DNA sequence: AGTGGTGGTCTCAAAAAGAGACCAGCACTA
DNA sequence: TAGTGCTGGTCTCTTTTTGAGACCACCACT
C-alpha cells in the first residue's frame, strides 16, 4: 500500500513534468499510454496474448473492426514494439501477428485493468444508470 | 502465473462473447474500458488520485486540455462513477472534483499500467526509432 | 472463365477532439 | 460607478480520427 502510494505520487510527478516541459513527448507515461488507449489496441493485444493470429483471423475474431482500423492499429502496435509481423511466402502470402516480449510484458500490466473491468462492470453500469436518472 | 493465464483466457472469452452477442454493451470489459481509454481519462484520474481539484486547478494542471474536453471528460468520469462533483456556494460558486471509492479502486488497477509505462518508455521509444528506420 | 480467399489500400462520410469566442454572477479596484 | 478579473462553464467552427465500404493483384480450385 505504501509503495503504491509512492508510485502514485511519482506518476503524477511525471504527468506534471510534461505540463511544464510543453511537448507531449516529454512525458514518457503519456507518450506510452497514448499508444495504448486507442479504441482497438487493448482488444487486439488481448487477442494476440492468447495466441498468434493472421490478419483475416483477427478480422473474423473482431467483426466490428473495420479493415482499415485493423491495419492501422496493428501497424501502430508493431511500431511501438508490442507486436511482431511475419510474412510467410505461401501461395497467397499469409501474414501472422504475434506479441513480442515487450508486448507480453505490457499485457501483464494491462491485465490488472481488464480484470478490474470484469469484476466491476456491474458497479459502473449501476453508476451510469443512477447518474442518467438524476440528469433526466 | 497460472492464475494469470486463466485470467487471460477468461478475458478473451469475454471479448469473444461480445463478438457473438453483437451489441457493444454485451461485452462488459469493452464497455468499461471504452470509458477509460479517452485521451484525458487516465491523466485526470491520476491527478484526482493525488488530491481533489477544482475545475480551474485541473485546467492549470493540464494546460494542453481544452476547456471543452475537460468538462466532457469529467462529466464522463462522473457518469461512470469514478469521480464525484461537488458544488460549493462560495461567492463565485466553486466546483470540486474528487475520486470516489470506485474511482480509487479503478486507479489502483490502472496504476500497474502507468507504472509499466514509466519503466518501459525507453524500450517503446527505441522500438519506434528502430521501426521508423526500417520504414524510411 | 468464374469464384473465392489472401492482405491490404483508397475514398468518402460521420464522429470525436481542439481552438477559441462568449456568458452570467460577484468581488475588488479605480 | 465603470472597469477588470475570476468562477465554471457552453457554443460554434475547424481539424483530426474513425467507420463503411469499394477496389486491387495474386493465385487456387472448379
Image (tube, coloured by chain):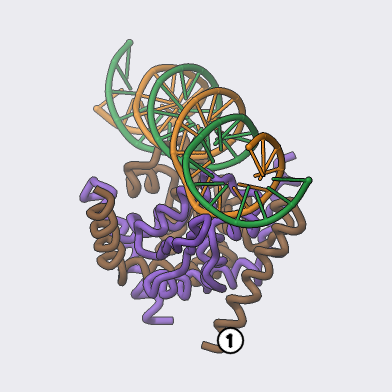
Chain colours: A brown, B purple, C green, D orange
Q: Residue furthest bottom?
A: A2
Return the residue nearer the eye: D29 or D20.
D20
Task: Look at the image and tell me whether residue B118 can be seen.
Answer: yes
Locate residue A67 relative to residue B66 in the image: left or right: left
The image shows residue C12, relative to residue B128, as above or below, that is: above
Q: Which residue has dot 1 on it?
A: A3
Q: Residue at x 45, y 63 (%)?
A: B88
**In the image, residue A41 lies at what x, y percent?**
48, 52
Q: Residue at x 56, y 89 (%)?
A: A2
The image shows residue B56, relative to residue C2, as above or below, that is: below
**In the image, residue B80 lies at what x, y percent?**
35, 59
Task: Look at the image and tell me whether residue A52 can be seen.
Answer: no
User: How many numbered discs?
Assistant: 1
Locate residue A34 relative to residue B19 in the image: left or right: right
Q: Residue at x 32, y 43 (%)?
A: A63
Q: Residue at x 21, y 50 (%)?
A: B21
Locate residue A41 relative to residue B128 in the image: left or right: left
The image shows residue B117, relative to residue C11, as above or below, that is: below
Judged from the image, the secondary structure of the residue bearing numbered disc 1 is helix
Return the residue nearer the eye: B11 or A92.
B11
Chain under numbered label 1? A
> Which quadrant: the C terminus of chain B?
top right
Q: Quadrant of residue A21?
A: bottom right
Locate residue A135 relative to residue A75 in the image: left or right: left
Return the residue nearer the eye: B130 or A88.
B130
Mark 1 neighbour density, 10 Å: few (under 14) some (14–19) many (20 or more): few
Amino acid at each position: 500500500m505504501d509503495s503504491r502510494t509512492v508510485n502514485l505520487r511519482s506518476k503524477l510527478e511525471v504527468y506534471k513534468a510534461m505540463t511544464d516541459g510543453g511537448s507531449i513527448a516529454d512525458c514518457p507515461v503519456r507518450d506510452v499510454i497514448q499508444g495504448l488507449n486507442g479504441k482497438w489496441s487493448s482488444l487486439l493485444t488481448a487477442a494476440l496474448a492468447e495466441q498468434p493470429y493472421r490478419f483475416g483471423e483477427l478480422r473474423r475474431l473482431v467483426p466490428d473492426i473495420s479493415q482499415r482500423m485493423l491495419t492501422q492499429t496493428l501497424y501502430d502496435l508493431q511500431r511501438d514494439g508490442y507486436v511482431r509481423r511475419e510474412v510467410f511466402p505461401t501461395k497467397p502470402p499469409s501474414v501472422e501477428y504475434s506479441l513480442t516480449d515487450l508486448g507480453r510484458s505490457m499485457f501483464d500490466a494491462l491485465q490488472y485493468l481488464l480484470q478490474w473491468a470484469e469484476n466491476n462492470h456491474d458497479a459502473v453500469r449501476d453508476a451510469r444508470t443512477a447518474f442518467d436518472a438524476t440528469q433526466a
